[in-house]
Image (spheres, rainbow, N blue to C red):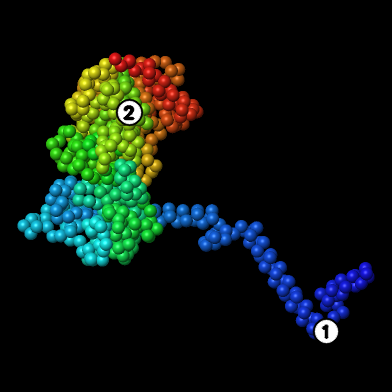
Amino acid sequence: MKSRAEGGIIRKCQLLSFQRSDEPGQRRRFWVSSSLCGLVAFSLFSFAYSLFLHRVAFCNLTGRSPSFASAHLTADTDRDMSSLATTDISHIEFGISSSAETWDRQRPYNELWWRPGEMHGYVWLDEEPPADSTWPHTCPPYRVSTLNSSGTGGSIFPPAARIARTIVESYRAVMAEPGSREVRWFVIGDDGTVFFPDNLVAMLNKYNHEEMYYIGSISESVEQTMQHSYSIAYGGAGFVVSRNIAAELAEIMDGCLERYASLYGSDERVQSCISELGVTLTIEPGFHQVDLQDDIYGLLAAHPVAPLLSLNHLGHVKLISPHWVTQVEAAKSLVDVSRHDPSRTLQQTICYEKGPHTNWSVSVSWGHSVQVYPQEVAPKELAKPLMTFRTWRTRNLGPFTFDTRSVDPNRPCELPLIFFLNHARPETGRNGKIVRTITEYSRNMTDNVTSTCKLQSFTEALKVQTVSVYAAKMDPAEWKRAPRRQCCRTRRMRKGKILQVYNGWGQDLTFEFERKRNRPQSWYDCISTEKGTYGSSGAAPQVSPSGWYTTISICMKWSKGMTSSMMGSQSPIKTRKTSQFDLWRAATSSWKAATPVET
């Protein structure tokens, strides 16, 4: 048996090595077998090589590894953004939805922000205005919508279909214009929307107009968002679509509106059609639908760290400033001051004034109001809007889609003294260029804050008659960076009757007239002490004979190499490694001791 098996193996080996086999049939079988074996072996080798040595991602259609493809895509995107020309107001087409019935009532709000000859767009009406009326040149020109019958088929609210088509109407109007004006963005709003155009431009420069963008914001009232959607941009606040989306909607809108004829509002219909393009909402918190009732002061006094883009429903709320008789006048005051420093408008800064008889928290909403609290309030709380408003539909005290804090009139020492804007004026340097804006605010004597608060700090605060805020013009390019609130410092003048506030980035804040441009913030105000000499021993400060008080910051982000020259003192301050919790504990350790007991 053994010899027989050995003989079989030898014969097979001889066959494979061409030994003792010269017959043509055997040669043919050998070549076929060898070819098949070689093909299988090569296939297995190629598979193993690709799988284990190069780690091919089978679903990666780019032919690159996932990490390389992602890095390559990011690099291409950055390169594309850097090569794009800056967007300006000429690249924006405005589309304002209105009707012949409501236009005269809402027209004054459009005249506040529209700049004839500089901006482009139309007011889209449902019919021609009365023949005996003259269209004002201070407003956008008008056109009548060309809604065809197919656009409202089966709709339970036909005007919504017409308003939803404002994007398409605006796009087709641009395409029909002679010349070569480049339109990158379409801004859509209602006839009662007050836009802030310079901030719109600054915001849009963050985005690539060649991509598909649908930009806006949701309602402030949870009941509204639950009834409609958290995914739609509310048209009263205004929203923006890129040119590519407008072009696509021009092709599909009429058929799309038929598919969504059962929806009630125009905003839902627009979002439904855009969702068919695979595009989702990009939220910008500077758009304000103002689905609120009563007084929106709390919202305006603690604006998000984002550019103010729009305000809506101003005709349905209380005066945004008691210094004026009508809401249009109050809104005009805000729009006018925004022209001095658009990016800074409504931006909140927080600082603290602490002296022999003062223990204040100061919150500035630039261009609108200043709050002075007679005791320390943490930045976390000051950044929350006071709940001075109610929900839009049911007039309830919430819930809202942002944080709020309640107002308790039975605790008067927790209520702020409120100062509203009086006027603004630019300040020029030696070269004649504007270096900063000075805004002045006066006390609102109807703020219901009485002398029932017995804190000495409150008594001192009642002496303040005017708050003057000094601020260098904010660079719109700041909105391309991570959002961060700026700092401020305070100084009392004329026996406490005037409170001066200096806004800016930390290392730029000095009491001399600041001529520098804003630089990145390296430290943050969280507590104030009297001006004097500070060392590392922690000894009590020596009060300056001048009587000036300066805000000295305990660093939330401790900067290496920080010196006392940045903080108004004379001797260097030693830096050390510490946690944010340690710094905040150090900043707040004296609050209870420094706050007199309320009686």
- Circle 1: residue type: Glu
Q: How crowded is mark 1: few (under 14 residues within 10 Å), some or many (20 or more)?
A: few
> 125 or 292: which is nearer to us?
292
Q: Residue at horizontal 31%, vertical 43%?
A: 223
> 340 or 174: which is nearer to us?
174
Quadrant containing the C terminus in the rendered view: top left
Quadrant containing the N terminus in the rendered view: bottom right
Vertical placement of residue 553 versus 194, above or below: above
**Residue marked by disc 2:** 351
Q: Is residue 10 visible?
A: no
| Residue 354 position within the rendered picture, expressed as x and y whole percent measured from the top left | 32, 21
Q: How far apart are marks 1 and 2 (CA)?
A: 103 Å
Q: Is residue 581 left or right of residue 169?
A: right
Q: Residues within 10 Å of mark 2 (few under 14, many from 20)?
A: many
- Circle 2: residue type: Cys
Q: For residue 186, which numbered disc appears in the image? A: none
Q: Residue at horizontal 21%, vertical 32%?
A: 420
* Mark found first going from the N terminus, 1 or 2: 1
Q: Residue at horizontal 35%, vertical 19%?
A: 532
Q: Which mark lies nearer to you, 1 or 2?
A: 1
| Residue 243 position within the rendered picture, expressed as x and y whole percent measured from the top left | 32, 59
Q: In this view, does 324 lie to the left or right of 51?
A: left
> 265 or 478: which is nearer to us?
265
Label 1 sits on a secondary structure element that is: loop
Give the quadrant of residue 521. top left
Give the quadrant of residue 455. top left
Q: Is residue 289 visible?
A: yes
**Residue marked by disc 1:** 23
Q: Residue at horizontal 37%, vertical 25%?
A: 527
